[in-house]
């Protein structure tokens, strides 16, 4: 059985960092996450945004890592914010009373259809129907 894997990508902008996590957060990978978040504080980062879209699994070890990092970041005068958790992770946060870690980002803009007679260079979604006429 292969070992769980967690890839961590960090992008800094002054005192703010975006951490994108991809893979599984569990007992085996939580130390990497913990070190990444602690290093942000050591580097002077005070606002840490964590993108969770590519996270496929997070257990209570990962949750504890986030809670500990949030406490340390708050003590340093900053904030740790989790964005876009999976439904399972969102449920874990709800069940444990940890939704205060969640911060919503604005949804991506929805495409607008061109006015009648206007020329558009953007693709427009097309509905596809099957042979029975059902969508």
Image (cartoon, grey):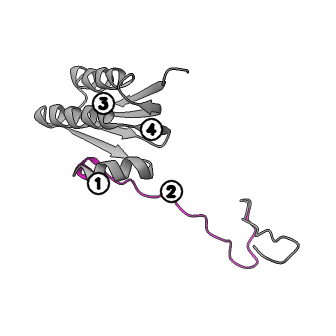
What residue did someone put label 4 on?
57
Mark 3 and mark 1 residues within 8 Å of each other at the beta carbon: no
Judge from the rendering whether residue 94 lies leftward or rightward of residue 130; answer left or right: left
In this rendering, the label closer to the viewer, 3 or 1: 1
Q: Residues within 10 Å of mark 3 (few under 14, many from 20)?
A: few
What residue did someone put label 2 on?
108
Judge from the rendering whether residue 95 lies leftward or rightward of residue 131; answer left or right: left
What separation in Å lies between label 4 and label 1 (alpha carbons)? 16 Å
Q: Residues within 10 Å of mark 2 (few under 14, many from 20)?
A: few
Q: Residues within 10 Å of mark 4 (few under 14, many from 20)?
A: some
What residue did someone put label 3 on?
14
Question: Which x, y percent locates residue 85?
Answer: 41, 47
Looking at the image, residue 126 lies above or below residue 46: below
Q: Of the numbered discs in the image, which one, if any, rests on residue 94?
A: 1
Q: Earlier in the sequence, mark 2 or mark 1?
A: 1
In this rendering, the label closer to the viewer, 2 or 1: 1
Looking at the image, residue 121 lies above or below residue 96: below
Looking at the image, residue 114 lies above or below residue 67: below
Q: Which residues are magenta?
A: 98-120
Q: Earlier in the sequence, mark 4 or mark 3?
A: 3
Q: Residue at x 50, y 39 (%)?
A: 54
């Amino acid at each position: 059985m292969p070992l769980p894997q967690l890839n961590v990508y960090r992008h800094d902008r002054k005192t703010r960092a975006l951490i994108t996590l991809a893979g599984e957060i569990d007992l085996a990978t939580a130390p990497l996450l913990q070190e990444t978040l602690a290093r942000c504080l050591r580097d002077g980062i005070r606002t840490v945004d964590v993108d969770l879209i590519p996270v496929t699994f997070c257990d209570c070890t990962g949750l504890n890592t986030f809670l500990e990092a949030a406490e340390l970041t708050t003590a340093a005068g900053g904030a740790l914010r989790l964005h876009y958790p999976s439904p399972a992770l969102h449920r874990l946060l709800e069940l444990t009373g940890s939704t205060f870690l969640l911060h919503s980002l604005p949804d991506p803009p929805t495409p607008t259809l061109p006015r009648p007679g206007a020329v558009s260079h953007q693709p427009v979604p097309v509905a596809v129907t099957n042979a029975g006429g059902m969508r």
